Image: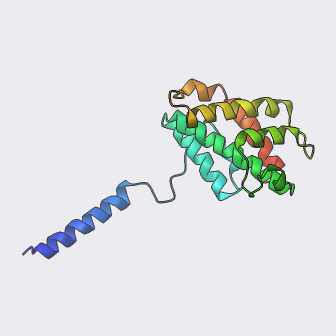
Amino acid sequence: MFTPNKIKTFIESFENDCIKSLLPPEEGLISNDQSIIPHALIRGTRGYLEKIMHQANGCYANGWYDACAVMIRRLIETLIIETFETYNLAHKIQGPSGDFLYLSDLINITLSEQSWNLSRNAKQALPKLKDIGDKSAHSRRFNAVRHDIDKIQADIRVVVQELTYLAQLK
């Protein structure tokens, strides 16, 4: 016989099973898609960089282009910081309180830093990547479309690969 307590226990158990089987895992999923950032560029570096890569690729694969642009922006910002930290130059990109500067300042300082030599392509690409990321993150009336991401795909690859090597992550 079913008692109210047994029914309640069954329902709670069923709800828990549904949550476990229907929702993605707590730490997120790995993207099978490599349309934006090839896995080989980031795989084996740092776990948090790999998660950002998977999120950018997954967003693109699902048509979430604003989210994709924001994740690309986040990856570039993080790789710039990693590069400065590798060269023990983090102080150059920190404000008086020790917080890292905004991306526009990070890019300007990165472009003028003499400790490394960015390629011409990377120098030209950084502002473009920032622009689409900024529009997607901050512009109320801008919504990225697939073409917006597609036209910066080569720039993404150049910048991500170059900063990954400069940060000595590969």
Residue 71 appears in which quarter of the rendering? top right
Give 17 or 8, whichever is nearer the viewer. 8
Q: Image check: 54 left or right of 102?
A: left
Q: Residue at x 15, y 75 (%)?
A: 5
Q: Residue at x 70, y 49 (%)?
A: 78
Q: From what the image shows, is residue 21 above or below residue 110?
A: below
Does any portion of residue 24 appear in the rendered image?
yes
Give 125 or 108, whichever is nearer the viewer. 108
Residue projecting furthest to the right = 114
Q: From what the image shows, is residue 113 above or below residue 129?
A: below
Q: Image check: 95 left or right of 47?
A: right
Q: Residue at x 6, y 75 (%)?
A: 1
Give 150 or 132, whichever is nearer the viewer. 132
- The image shows a total of numbered marks equal to 0
Q: Measured from the top left, where is residue 6 in percent x and y?
A: 15, 74
Does any portion of residue 170 appear in the rendered image?
no
Q: Residue at x 51, y 59 (%)?
A: 27
Residue 57 appears in which quarter of the rendering? top right
Q: Measured from the top left, where is residue 160 in percent x and y?
A: 73, 41
Residue projecting furthest to the front = 96
Q: Image check: 72 left or right of 114?
A: left
Q: Which color scheme does this rendered protein use? A: rainbow
Q: Measured from the top left, where is residue 79 in percent x and y?
A: 74, 48
Residue 36 appears in which quarter of the rendering? top right
Q: Measured from the top left, where is residue 144 in percent x and y?
A: 54, 29
